[in-house]
Amino acid sequence: MGKLSLLKRLHGEVIIQKEVYKEVVERGLKEGFSDALIVKECVNQGWIKVSTLNKREFDLCRRTMEHAAEVHLGETQAILLASELNTLLLMDESCGRAFAETWGLKVRGTLNVILRALREGSLNKDEAKEAVSSMINRGFRIEPKLLTRILKEIENFVPSNTPNS
């Protein structure tokens, strides 16, 4: 949706696993996705860091995937990394999110990033609505009730930058 810089503003640093880098950047470049170039540049700038699994971690990912076949390698690696770092996991894929939550991880998705950016003043209401609309137009799947709730929350948002009397 063209708002990757929001992650830098909201989180400062983002760490992705090597498999996620391969999926997003290496395969993305081969398939001509413009966001692959953007992510690659963010890695070059150093605020997106790429982590590589050691043998023990890779074996753990493989064993984990045996028990959660619907969770892919990149998602499993991200879950393991978030668990080891005891940090927030950003993930939209529902099976991966559910699996991460069973590990006790705090998981948020892109919609949460948009709402947080709105609350913190990095996006205004129109930009937030456009971001959600852009995601849906690009194939992001969302339950109609959740979409209605998100759009209502955006519409009803009142900035708290009014001076105190």
Image (tube, rainbow, N blue to C red):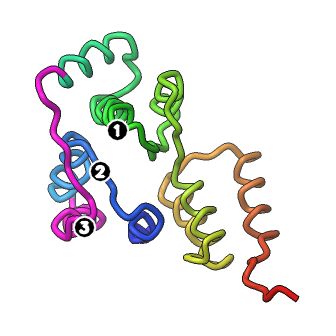
The three-letter amino acid code for the residue at tag 1 is Leu
* Relative depth, front residue between 164 and 2: 164
Q: Are marks 2 and 1 in contact (CB under 8 Å)?
A: yes
The three-letter amino acid code for the residue at tag 3 is Cys
Q: Which residues are magenta?
A: 32-56
Q: Residue at x 49, y 44 (%)?
A: 92
Secondary structure category for the residue under label 1: helix
Q: Earlier in the sequence, mark 1 or mark 3?
A: 3
Secondary structure category for the residue under label 2: strand
Nearest to the eye among marks 2 and 1: give it: 1
Residue at mark 1 to residue at mark 3: CA–CA distance: 21 Å
Q: Which residue is identified by label 1? A: 85
Position of 90 with respect to 49 (left or right) is: right
Is residue 21 placed above or below 113 in the rendered structure? above
Residue at mark 2 to residue at mark 3: CA–CA distance: 11 Å
> Is 39 one of the magenta-colored residues?
yes
Q: Residue at x 74, y 78 (%)?
A: 159
Q: Earlier in the sequence, mark 2 or mark 3?
A: 2
Nearest to the eye among marks 1 and 3: give it: 1
Q: Which residue is identified by label 2? A: 15
Q: Residue at x 61, y 77 (%)?
A: 121
User: Which quadrant would residue 156 be assigned to in this image?
Assistant: bottom right
Q: Are marks 2 and 3 in contact (CB under 8 Å)?
A: no
Q: Residue 59, position in %: x, y? A: 18, 17
Q: Earlier in the sequence, mark 2 or mark 1?
A: 2
Q: Residue 1, position in %: x, y? A: 45, 67
Q: Residue at x 52, y 48 (%)?
A: 109
Q: Which residue is identified by label 3? A: 42
Question: Crowding at label 1, few (<14), some or many (≥20) Cα neighbours within 10 Å?
Answer: few
Is residue 33 placed above or below 161 in the rendered structure? above
